[in-house]
Image (spheres, grey):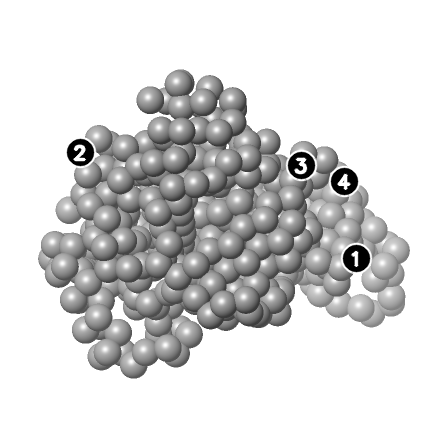
């Protein structure tokens, strides 16, 4: 499309749930290596926006291009392999062990051979220090452990973009640090990331761009420095006063 | 009291009475068994249609399933049995056992559908989302993720439904079929044992033992399905 480093282009994205209009025309572009943090008051539509990107919520209107290709109902399943997602409530598959969770997509989608996938899974588990939990069921893990497994599960397919939907909101304070440092590490390795979070200091530290959403629209965006130190709109000033 | 026990002895030492009871018991089991199979099969289909993601192809099937369960659950089983016997299958020479199996099967399907539907809906939607986000097909998600988790919630309620069907088949005596319930009555009066309490007491015992056995099996299955959870708590 316009330039080859552009991963995602979103034009006039709208989403309604019945009569409730949650997203009212979002235009957005994501470039490789960017780390976008989406902020906004609760109910602003920031999670819905993130969930529309991999069609967890099917957009009501608008166009999306991923790697220059128009996203449709037909190709979304293939495109999802390139968009990893990490959920607020982890969503590890409850009837599968940690290892089975990691192998599920690569093997079912025939993207890797079993021994190759197992090796990668073990490497990733070792990396996060949970290799000894490979055969454990998710129910026996702590929240922080679950979320770190969920992150490496998303990494198994080597996606181009990782979406994080409030990844630390359901965690106890002690686990938050572990999860954030894993995300930080992915960021340092150049992963393209989009995060919805309430962790302001983390947002400031990790973001290359902050996007502020209110009432289903992007009303301000910029670098963390611009956003936090010199907000342009009254709405953002008001928001920052409350949260900082 | 001694009369009661002498009647019990009489019942179990008279070949005719034993034959009558076993004959009745066999019919009860036959009707229940096939009705439950039909119920689970049809009930699963109804539940799948009902819980499937809405699409234009499913508008009519979803509507039909709803009407079906509403009618079946909203009318008495005895009336459904009568309609089957005296209206739909009022064909001379048509085997009454088939009519009864169909009547109870269609009835059980509506209840089984609710049980299965409830089991599917009790699985956290986040589980399906995780599968979708990984690019898995809805089919894979259903068979690998949703179904195995739903079954754990379905088994106990399904055990209940099986028990209900077995007991409910007793109303086939109302259309003159010779099931366990009818056998008890027949031994008491038709065959002149001159006691209702003893054959009915024994028939009750037959039902009770059968149902106890089923409860026991269901508990066993439940327990083995919960193994993955137990392992998790180590």
Q: Residue at x 43, y 59 (%)?
A: A31
Is B212 placed above or below A151 here?
above
> Which numbered mark, 2 or 3, is in the foreground of this view?
3
The secondary structure type at the circle numbered 3 is: strand
Q: Where is residue B109 shown, x and y percent of the image?
A: 64, 54
Question: Mark 4 or mark 1, which has the lower sequence index?
Answer: 1
**Residue with the mark numbered 3:** A21
Q: Where is residue B224 shown, x and y percent of the image?
A: 30, 55
Q: Which label is found at residue B60?
A: 1
**Residue with the mark numbered 4:** B75
**Residue with the mark numbered 2:** A174
**Looking at the image, do the residues carrying marks 4 and 1 touch, with CB atoms under 8 Å apart?**
no
Is B218 placed above or below B198 here?
below
Residue A5: tell me if it is visible: yes
Quadrant of the rendered image containing residue B76: top right
Q: Residues within 10 Å of mark 2 (few under 14, many from 20)?
A: few
Name the subunit of mark 2. Answer: A
Name the subunit of mark 3. Answer: A
């Amino acid at each position: 499309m316009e330039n080859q480093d552009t991963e995602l282009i979103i034009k006039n994205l709208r989403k309604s749930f019945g009569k409730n209009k949650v997203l009212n025309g979002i235009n957005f572009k994501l470039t490789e290596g960017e780390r976008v943090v989406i902020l906004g008051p609760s109910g602003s539509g920031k999670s819905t926006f993130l969930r529309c990107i991999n069609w967890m919520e099917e957009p009501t209107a608008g166009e999306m291009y991923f790697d220059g290709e128009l996203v449709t109902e037909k190709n979304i399943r293939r495109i999802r392999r390139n968009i990893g997602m990490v959920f607020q409530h982890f969503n590890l598959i409850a009837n599968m062990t940690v290892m089975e969770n990691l192998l599920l997509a690569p093997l079912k989608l025939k993207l890797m051979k079993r021994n190759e996938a197992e090796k990668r899974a073990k490497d990733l588990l070792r990396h996060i220090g949970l290799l000894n939990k490979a055969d454990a069921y998710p129910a026996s893990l702590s929240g922080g452990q679950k979320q770190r497994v969920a992150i490496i599960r998303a990494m198994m397919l080597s996606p181009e973009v990782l979406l994080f939907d409030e990844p630390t909101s359901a965690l106890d304070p002690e686990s938050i640090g572990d999860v954030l440092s894993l995300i930080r590490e992915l960021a340092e390795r150049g992963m393209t990331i989009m995060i919805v979070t309430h962790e302001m200091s983390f947002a400031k530290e990790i973001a290359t761009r902050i996007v502020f959403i209110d009432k289903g629209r992007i009303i301000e965006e910029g670098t963390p420095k611009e956003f936090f130190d010199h907000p342009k709109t009254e709405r953002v000033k008001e928001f920052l006063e409350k949260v900082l | 009291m001694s009369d009661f026990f002498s009647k019990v002895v009489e019942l179990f030492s008279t070949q005719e009475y034993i034959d009558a009871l076993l004959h009745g018991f066999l019919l009860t089991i036959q009707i229940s068994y096939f009705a439950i199979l039909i119920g689970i099969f049809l009930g699963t289909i109804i539940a799948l249609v009902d819980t499937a993601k809405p699409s234009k192809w499913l508008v009519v099937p979803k509507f039909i399933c709803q009407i079906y369960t509403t009618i079946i659950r909203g009318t008495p089983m005895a009336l459904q049995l009568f309609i089957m016997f005296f209206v739909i299958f009022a064909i001379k020479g048509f085997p009454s056992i088939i009519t009864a199996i169909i009547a109870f099967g269609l009835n059980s399907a509506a209840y089984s559908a609710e049980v299965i539907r409830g089991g599917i809906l009790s699985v956290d939607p986040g589980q399906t989302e995780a599968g979708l986000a990984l690019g898995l097909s809805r089919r894979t998600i259903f068979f690998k993720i949703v179904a195995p988790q739903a079954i754990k919630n379905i088994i106990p309620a399904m055990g209940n439904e099986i028990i209900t069907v077995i007991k409910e088949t007793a109303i086939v005596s109302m259309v003159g079929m010779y099931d366990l319930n009818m056998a008890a009555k027949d031994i008491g009066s038709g065959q002149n044992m001159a006691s209702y309490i003893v054959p009915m007491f024994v028939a009750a015992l037959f039902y009770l033992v059968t149902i106890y056995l089923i409860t026991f099996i269901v508990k066993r299955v439940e327990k083995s399905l919960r193994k993955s959870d137990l392992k998790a708590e180590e």
